[in-house]
Amino acid sequence: MEEAGRDRTGCENLQRALSGCHQRFGPGATRDAACRHLNRALAECLVSFVCPEESEAVRTLCGSGGTRLKRFQCQQAQLSLSVCISSHQPD
């Protein structure tokens, strides 16, 4: 994630915090519970870096309930985000 001493993604602090959490807690349910919020935050940060428009659309359209139209738009946004993420994964 780091290149030439610079954090390109803006997620470096979360990555360090998650690594530290993993060092403090051994593998298992305790670690999972203790580090869950950092794991989720890092994942969201990385997805936002890779697919910024799609991530923002999901946050905006899926943040709360709403009309049938909004639910449909939320589903479409989730699909677009899924496609974007898939396009960045190695074969």
Image (cartoon, rainbow, N blue to C red):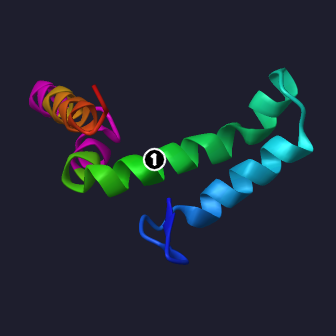
Tell which residue pokes out farthest to the bottom in this image.
Answer: 5
Rendering coords of residue 3 (x, y %): 47, 70
Q: Which residues are magenta?
A: 57-73
Closest to the observer: 84 or 67? 84
- Decide: is 67 above or below 56: above
Image position, residue 74 (x, y; %)? 20, 33
Residue at the image point whose x is 52% and y is 61% from the top = 11
Residue on which the image places disc 1: 44
Observer-nearest residue: 10 or 68? 10
Residue 28, quarter of picture? top right
Q: Quadrant of the C terminus?
A: top left
In this image, 48 relative to 20: left or right?
A: left
68 is within the stretch colored magenta: yes
Q: Nearer the viewer, residue 75 or 36?
A: 36
Q: Could you tell me which secondary element the residue under label 1 belongs to?
A: helix
Type of the residue with mark 1? Glu
Q: Residues within 10 Å of mark 1 (few under 14, many from 20)?
A: some
| Residue in the image at 34% along x and 38% along y | 64
Residue shown at the point (80%, 53%) measured from the top left: 20
> Residue 22: percent from the left, percent from the top?
80, 42
Instruction: Please say whether residue 3 is one of the residues in the magenta stretch.
Output: no
Q: Is residue 13 above or below residue 22?
A: below
Main secondary structure type of the part rendered in magenta: helix
Marker count (numbered): 1
**Is residue 85 positioned above or below 15 on the image?**
above
Identify which residue is drawn at 46% across, 54% down.
45
Please tell me in which quadrant of the rendered image residue 27 appears. top right
